[in-house]
Image: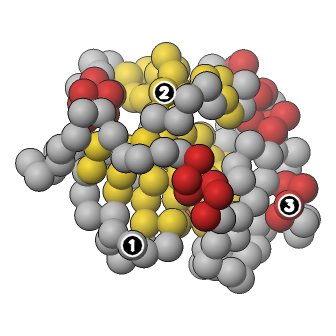
Amino acid sequence: MRSFPSSFAALALAVPTAVQAASGDCPPSITPELESSFGEPVAWLEPGQTVHQPAELTVVGQPVSYVLVIRASGEGGPITELDYRLRGNTKPFGERYSVDLRQAFDKSFSASECGSARNVPCAVVFKSSAADQFNGAELSEGDLSIPKEAHGDGLPLVEADYDLADADPVFLACHYGPAD
């Protein structure tokens, strides 16, 4: 099984700014309208993890091929993460994200400095106390796993990313809920 660790949890940066203004390309909160905008799932991975294919969606200036919706406590739990798969973007093992992508992340999230020459992670963390409120974002290789129970017509999208050779898929991961 291929699994990618997230640098998000390791970050200790807390930026005191309004979530609404700072959420960039991530929705500031999870609403019923947002959930319905993703459409019906096209694949089911692990419990509480579904794949959606919203039409003509872009984030950080990149088209999105699919969205992983991750819920706490399995099916029906609150959404804790939205992972937007940036169509066609990969990150070779051991390398940084492309300069253009890092700069687009900085443009979307003004608290970020990952587009600079310094070796700074592409992640921002904000304080949030509500379960449905944005609390941070990061460029990520995702945390893909495909259990044998996974199913759905959209599963080949995820399998293609899972099977990439010499590179990882690139996601914009938006996190929700109380900040740890």
Label annotation for residue 76: 1
Figure disc tally = 3
Question: What amino acid is at disc 1?
Answer: Gly
Question: What amino acid is at disc 3?
Answer: Gln
* Crowding near the residue tagged with mark 3, few <14, some 14–19, many ≥20 C-alpha atoms within 10 Å: few
Label annotation for residue 65: 2
Where does residue 42 sit, x and y in percent of width and height?
33, 40
Q: Identify residue for label 3.
A: 20
Helix, strand or loop status at disc 1? loop
Residue situated in front as seen by the camera: 102 or 156 = 156
Helix, strand or loop status at disc 2? strand
Residue situated in front as seen by the camera: 20 or 165 = 20
On the picture, is 51 further left or further right than 29? Answer: left
Seen at 75% across and 59% down, the residue is: 28
Helix, strand or loop status at disc 3? helix
Q: Which of marks 2 and 1 is nearer the N terminus?
A: 2
Where does residue 76 sit, x and y in percent of width and height?
39, 73
